[in-house]
Amino acid sequence: MPVTFTRTPVDTERKHTGIGGKPPASRRPTGGGGDGDNWDGQRGRKGPRQLLTRWRLGVFFALIGDMMFFVAIVSSFFVSQAGGHFDPRTHNYISTWRPVSVPSILWLNTAVLVLSSLTMEMARRQLFREIDVMEEWLGMGRPALRRATPWLIATALLGGIFLFGQWLAWEQMWTDKVLLASDPARYFFYLITGFHGAHLIAGIIALLGALASLSLLRRVEYRQIVVDCTAWYWHCMGVFWLFLFALLVSAQ
Amino acid sequence: MTDPLESAQAIQHSGPNAEPRRRRSWIRRYIFTTDHRTIGIQYLLLALIAVIIGASLSLLMRLHLAWPDLPMPFWGVMKPEDYLALVTMHGTLMVFFVLTTAPQSGFANLVLPEQIGSRQMALPLLNAASFWLTVLSLLVLVSAFFMPGGAPISGWTSYPPLSAIAASGPGQALGMDIWLVSIGIFCIASTLASVNMLTTIVAERCEGMTLDRMPLTVWSWLVASMITVLVFSVLFAAAVLLLCDRHLGTAFFVPMGDLVNGQIVGHGDGTPLLWLHLFWFFGHPEVYIAILPGMGITSSLLANFSRRPALGYRLMALTTVLIGLLGFLVWGHHMFVSGMNPYAGTAFALTTMAIAVPSTAKVLSWIGTIWGGNLRLTTPMLFSLGFLSLFIAGGVTGPLLALPILDAYLHNTFFVVAHFHLIMAMAAIFSVFAGVYYWFPLMAGRQLHEGWGKVHFWLTFIAAYSTFFPMHLAGLAGEPRHYSQLSGGAASMAALIPLQRYISISAIVLVAAQLIFLTNLIWSVWHGKLSPANPWQATTLEWSTASDGQPIVLRGPYDYGVHPGQSDFLPQDALEPNPE
Ligand code: HEM
Ligand SMILES: [Cu+2]
């Protein structure tokens, strides 16, 4: 028996659904349509939006995992900061933790990174302007490509400048003979800036990928997904950096 | 000879509207596929390979413990460091590659999308990628055996300084690095797998599949995936820090002035406690990743085979979430005697006691579900009952160990080994067996042989208790874990050798009983009884016989025995039977 035939009436008539007094299930949220990519399929309520939601969710969950990585590093930071050892000569509990004074160029870098988040957001918004989307959808032109490209390039450049700035900070520390293995505070300075830098390199690669895909991908919704997900990743790295930087500054 | 996977799909995609599957090359269909069901079977096979290696290693360990002077294949007369290498690889294989992959990724890939009425996973490519990363990670791990110096010796928990200093043991140079790399890859793989799983559960449910209609298996996969995403990154961070300690000259984990082989290796203010905190923040939730899916499977199967609704469905969903949450607050119970602040020990003891409450609620619900029910003692049901029994037996020792005073004596003894082998090794594996017997028709289109299944169950059940229960006694007598020999000076320990011999003999029986399972498995793929579409008369959607592609869910997952006189079960997507 085709299920479509009777679906709504049967559903509303049911009394013992085991969920007492709630509206019929067809009117309660389930999250999705469950039919994957079958957009052109017979039953409604599927569409490009669903694919975007899925990818966003995926990036969101992955970023939660990534956040826990930094949480672990920061917790270790505090544990090490409080650590020490017993010194038999002075009969004291002493610590080798000597705070790192943050190179002042980091302030500039931070400003650059915040700016890059703004340009990234501008790029992202270009892909969701309704008129443009419609135009691209109908195949009449590529307005979003034209509008978003400069913003994406700007973001990648600003990201590059940030990384270069971080590198300058490291160089400055090396000339001052502040090396990774000198003492716990230094380990963390290098590790935190290093891990965050590695994440940004991944972000720049994603940006370049997004730039390429803007002209390569055939469907509007795929182009939206690539730029949108890159943007959320980029924003998130910006926010992570603000926290990490605050930690470094407050501990100096 | 029919293609087993094809006939399995025939069960699922029969009917007039089923689209003909595009035929792909053999490699695309069975090896590098994005089809979630095939990936599920691949995960299960990976776990099977890992469990075979892991169990063989444990047999070598058991033989050595009982007959220390017996020469072993590959090793000759075993040196203490060889024994420790076996312990390490056994634990790592079992915890990561068996208990994390089979119940979670294996079964979820096999049935989760169908159970929520979806045709596929939300992110199929990511799903396939995480499987192949897991394979890579397993290969890297096993390669540690062939490194100069052999496999690492610091146990699955890899406590520093042992794990941080290359000079501290034969396998601690390259072998340990390999271990860390393997675990790093595994962390990434399982995080990605869980990202896919979470997205699927959140975004892919079909019409009518509201949260309070999800089968309890789906609830447990949801919570276990959430835990995975949150804790594996922490293990990853710990592994990275340890690698820094080993190669970049940092000292996160090695204390000042630490002596190894007569040389001072500690030069910073590191502390092994930091590793313990990071590791167990991962480690305790990890044991729930291993057991939660088993709990979900048990709830579903007990309801099905007693033909009654799962008792307290909402409470069961709630306790699943609660166990997941509380699991984040108890890691310190592994560290009572580690030199952690004693006040912290009290706090962790309290949170650990608290987690026993939702666990007990679950046990009560299972007992209530089967109590006075019309039990169908099929093989999957027997294994679910076995899970229940082993979960109780292994669970009661948990709160004992959670008392800091008792744990000061019992920590690192065979008592702990007994606790976690009963609950983690045996109970969790029993739920995996239950799942395999139950869902085998979805894998091969045929059923496993029931008679041999029952023989397999009884032998395994008896041998499991007979192997792991006496370990409590060894632990109470003070036998430490990770010791390769009991003979020698300490007379009190030598007195335990007969007990250890008994345990070893039952372990051999236990492993031998699995040969029955393996034979049954291989035989049934081609010769098993052809399975009807819904062999267990189940209500959940993976067994749905509706001819039409996308189901619409009309009721909760456990409508068993609700309409006496008519059909005693109502699938989630079935229309109401006509009252005539
Ligand atoms: C009522 C629930 C539980 C309580 C109160 C509990 C308590 C404990 C305690 C206090 C320890 C530490 C003992 C020591 O090292 O001295 C421990 C160890 C362990 N538990 Fe549990 N546990 C419970 C359930 C579980 C479950 C469900 C699993 C796995 C499925 C599990 C797996 C383990 C493992 C693997 C270890 C040993 C880890 C190691 O040292 O290698 N436990 N448990
Ligand atoms: Cu624990």
Image (cartoon, coloured by chain):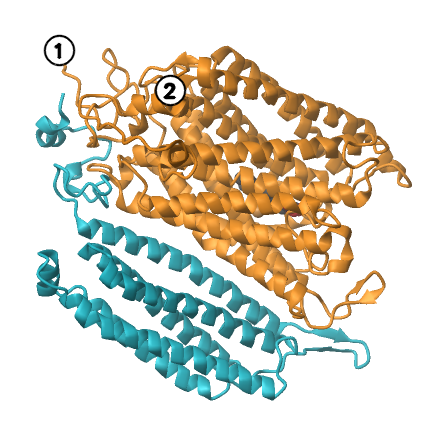
Chain colours: A cyan, B orange
The chain identifier of the residue carrying mark 1 reads: B
Instruction: Give the residue displayed 17% in from the left and 18% down from the top.
Output: B577
Element at badge 2? loop
Q: Label 1 amino acid?
A: Glu
Q: In the shown orientation, is residue B343 left or right of residue A16? A: right
Residue A174, given in percent of the width and then of the height, sits at 59, 84
Q: Residues within 10 Å of mark 2 (few under 14, many from 20)?
A: many
* Image location (x, y in percent) of residue A173: 57, 85
Is B222 on the left-hand or right-hand side of B148? Answer: left
Residue at the farthest front position: B25
**Which residue in the protein does label 1 denote?**
B580
Q: Residue at x 38, y 28 (%)?
A: B300
Q: Position of residue B234 (x, y in %)?
A: 52, 58
Q: Amino acid at mark 2?
A: Gly
User: Residue A179 vs residue A29: left or right?
Assistant: right
User: Which residue appears at 40% of the width and 21% of the height?
Assistant: B4
Mark 1 / mark 2, whichever is N-terminal = 2
Above or below B525: residue B218: below
Q: Position of residue B327 (x, y in %)?
A: 49, 49
Mark 1, residues whose alpha carbon is within 10 Å: few (<14), some, or many (≥20)?
few
Tag on residue B445?
2
As rendered, which of A197 and A8 lies closer to the eye? A197
- Looking at the rendering, in which quadrant would you find the N terminus of chain B? top left
Q: What residue is at 29 percent from the left and 74 percent from the top?
A: A153
Residue nearest the viewer, comparing B450 with A193: A193
Viewer can see residue B294:
no
Label 1: which secondary element: loop
